[in-house]
């Protein structure tokens, strides 16, 4: 395991922010750390980086205890916490040069990173003039600068446009598949995590609700077929008679558990045959709230 | 040690384009230049003064401005600036998640603030001597060349440097703890005024108050030399007085205390 925590707990004053968290992040994985805002994700990340002192429990990273091997462990981690920490009065390049100086990384690496996150043209612009997306990309460049074995990224796609989100996602996948890195990435979007993670941990109110491979999560978060039609109640009854599992019916659409694409086509044909106009039919993922509900009910 | 050197170099790299760095250079230049202009335009009135008196007036005018208010306020500003650069950019968390010992980061930052004050005082010394000698070239009636003040003035500035240490540690810690501008600056300003009043009024325990030390240093030089009416006038500096001793003790104690606060502090 690259990250292995046991019974990790932390509180701010009387508020328990992290409760008995046991994370297991295998080597070579993209571990999606999923939870709504305020679930304790950032606090957990700060504990993993030794920025906050653990109340209870232990953290082992690269099979070493974090408390006693702080420097050796941090030397192999690149991190991005909350909004990127950038010196606004320095240019993007100067921010990287400063970090390269501290980490004794050759300056040539600075240009590589600028190219990687597409900031070459804006390299000499003051970082305070950067858009949120550019700042985020510079933050990612700073995290990648020392070529770390483990990347810890807190909501790295925040503020990025769709293209930027896809780029970051592909970059992370490439880092893991081609360069043998391990990535620990937090997010509050299930769809985001599903698209890139190999492993998932779900946290809410400081507690780990689920941890496992993406396959195991998909078994729980069964996708649905959402159908927009005229008379949803009658249409639902028709589908039920055909032995389909209708999970939700409301005024403008109904949901059926997804099993296969072929079945989706059959549903479409069935409804049309019976004079129910199908305005739209598509596959949807459960949102995080419903997923939480399912997980907690199963537990 | 490597972490300390790297952090120190990084401090320079980060601040080299900021007011914190340039104020330490511009301030001595501007003040020395202004006094130089004053002497240049009023040279006739001083043409009968002996060299020692000229130097005493010239360096004394600069020291008077410095010691009473400027030096403590400059320290307040520098201590604030080197810490604020991290507060403002929210970079404490990234700084403390680098593979560099916290001790190195903390002490390099402190050392850098100290370096800026050394730089500022060294430039004051240099510009005082430079402008004084320039005056004697441009206005030969001013007999600056009669007397050599270099070693004495160096001692005075060394003493000022020691007198600055206590305030530096206190302000450094305040600026590290509070991210807003008003607290460290407000406390620093109020304490400086109190220090000037305490030292100026001759309060017997002023030597225990770090914010009085710069003023006490300047005052002691005036007093030591004003009283002398002997045949051979001589400027004397008593480097290790009890106020300097207090300044150094306070500075070391607060510096160490600050480190333990940094260790315990959670980085939010």
Image (cartoon, coloured by chain):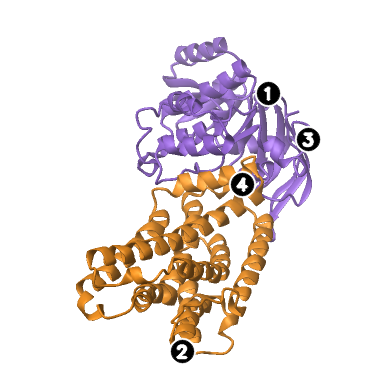
Chain colours: A purple, B orange
Dot 3: element: strand
1 and 2 marks in contact (CB < 8 Å): no
The residue to which callout 1 is attached is A219
The Cα–Cα distance between marks 2 and 4, rounded to whole angstroms, is 47 Å
Percent x, y of residue A130: 37, 39
Marked residue chain, label 1: A
**Mark 1 on the same chain as mark 2:** no
Q: Which residue is drawn at the image coordinates 24% and 77% (left, top)? A: B47
SS at badge 4:
helix
For disc 2, the neighbor class at 10 Å (few under 14, some 14 to 19, many from 20) is few
Residue located beneath label 2 in the image: B227
- The residue under label 4 is B4
Disc 3 with disc 4 on a shared chain:
no
Left or right of residue B12: residue A56: right
The quadrant the N terminus of chain A occupies is top right
In the image, is residue B86 above or below residue A283? below
At a point 56% along the width and 53% down the height, the residue shown is B109
Depth order, front residue of B86/A129: B86
Q: Do the residues bearing badges 2 and 3 touch, measured as CB atoms within 8 Å?
A: no
Task: Evaluate whether label 1 is on the same chain as label 3.
Answer: yes
Instruction: Determine the chain carrying the residue at label 2.
Output: B
Give the distance between the C-alpha atoms of the residues marked 4 and 1, in whole angstroms.
52 Å
Residue B230 or A62: which is nearer the viewer?
B230
Residue A25 vertical position relative to residue A82 in the rendered view, above or below? above
Q: Earlier in the sequence, mark 1 or mark 3?
A: 3
For residue A156, say whether it is visible.
no
Asked if badges 2 and 4 are on one and the same chain, I answer: yes
Residue behind mark 3: A64
- Distance from disc 2 to disc 3, alpha carbons, whole Å, reads 69 Å
Mark 3, Cα crowd under 10 Å, few <14 / some 14-19 / many 20+, is some
Cα separation between marks 3 and 4: 25 Å
- The answer for which chain carries disc 3 is A
């Amino acid at each position: 395991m690259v990250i292995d925590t046991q019974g990790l707990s932390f509180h701010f004053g009387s508020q328990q922010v992290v409760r008995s968290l046991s994370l297991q992040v295998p080597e070579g994985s993209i571990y999606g750390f999923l939870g709504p805002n305020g679930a304790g994700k950032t606090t957990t990340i700060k504990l993993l980086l030794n920025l906050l002192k653990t109340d209870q429990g232990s953290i082992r990273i690269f099979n070493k205890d974090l408390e006693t091997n702080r420097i050796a462990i941090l030397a192999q981690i690149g991190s991005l916490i909350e909004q990127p920490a950038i010196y606004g009065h320095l240019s993007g390049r100067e921010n990287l040069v400063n970090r390269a100086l501290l980490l004794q990384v050759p300056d040539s690496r600075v240009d590589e990173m600028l190219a990687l996150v597409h900031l070459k043209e804006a390299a000499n612009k003051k970082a305070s003039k950067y858009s949120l997306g550019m700042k985020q990309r510079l933050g990612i460049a700073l995290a990648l600068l020392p070529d770390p074995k483990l990347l810890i990224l807190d909501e790295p796609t925040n503020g990025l446009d769709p293209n930027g989100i896809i780029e970051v996602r592909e970059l992370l996948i490439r880092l893991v598949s081609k360069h043998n890195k391990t990535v620990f990435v937090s997010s509050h979007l299930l769809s985001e995590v599903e698209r890139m993670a190999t492993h998932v941990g779900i946290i809410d109110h400081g507690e780990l609700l689920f941890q496992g491979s993406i396959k195991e999560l998909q078994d729980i978060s069964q996708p649905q077929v959402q159908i927009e039609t005229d008379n949803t109640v009658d249409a639902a009854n028709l589908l039920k008679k055909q032995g389909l599992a209708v999970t939700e019916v409301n005024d403008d659409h109904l949901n059926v558990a997804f099993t296969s694409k072929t079945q989706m086509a059959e549903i479409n044909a069935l409804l049309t045959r019976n004079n129910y106009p199908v305005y739209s039919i598509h596959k949807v993922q459960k949102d995080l709230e419903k997923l939480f509900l399912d997980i907690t009910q199963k537990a | 040690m490597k972490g300390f050197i790297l952090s120190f170099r990084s401090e320079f790299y980060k601040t080299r384009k900021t007011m914190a760095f340039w104020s330490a250079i511009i301030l001595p230049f501007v003040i020395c230049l202004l006094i130089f202009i004053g002497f240049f335009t009023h040279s006739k009135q001083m043409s009968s003064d002996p060299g020692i008196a000229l130097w005493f007036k010239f360096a004394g005018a600069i020291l008077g401005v410095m010691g009473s208010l400027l030096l403590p306020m400059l320290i307040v500003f520098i201590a604030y600036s080197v810490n604020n650069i991290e507060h403002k950019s929210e970079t404490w968390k990234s700084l403390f998640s680098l593979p560099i010992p916290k001790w190195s980061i903390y002490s390099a930052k402190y050392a850098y603030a100290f370096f800026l004050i050394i730089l500022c005082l060294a430039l004051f010394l240099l510009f005082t001597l430079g402008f004084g000698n320039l005056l004697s070239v441009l206005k030969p009636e001013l007999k600056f060349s009669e007397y050599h003040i270099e070693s004495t003035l160096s001692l005075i500035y060394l003493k000022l440097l020691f007198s600055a240490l206590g305030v530096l540690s206190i302000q450094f810690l305040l600026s590290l703890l509070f991210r807003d501008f008003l607290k460290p600056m407000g406390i620093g300003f109020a304490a400086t005024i109190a220090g000037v009043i305490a030292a100026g009024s001759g309060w017997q325990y002023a030597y225990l108050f770090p914010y009085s030390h710069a003023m006490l240093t300047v005052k002691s030089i005036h007093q030591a030399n004003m009283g002398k009416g002997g045949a051979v006038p001589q400027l004397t500096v008593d480097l290790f007085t009890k106020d300097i001793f207090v300044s150094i003790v306070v500075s070391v104690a607060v510096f160490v205390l600050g480190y333990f606060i940094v260790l315990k502090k959670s980085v939010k």
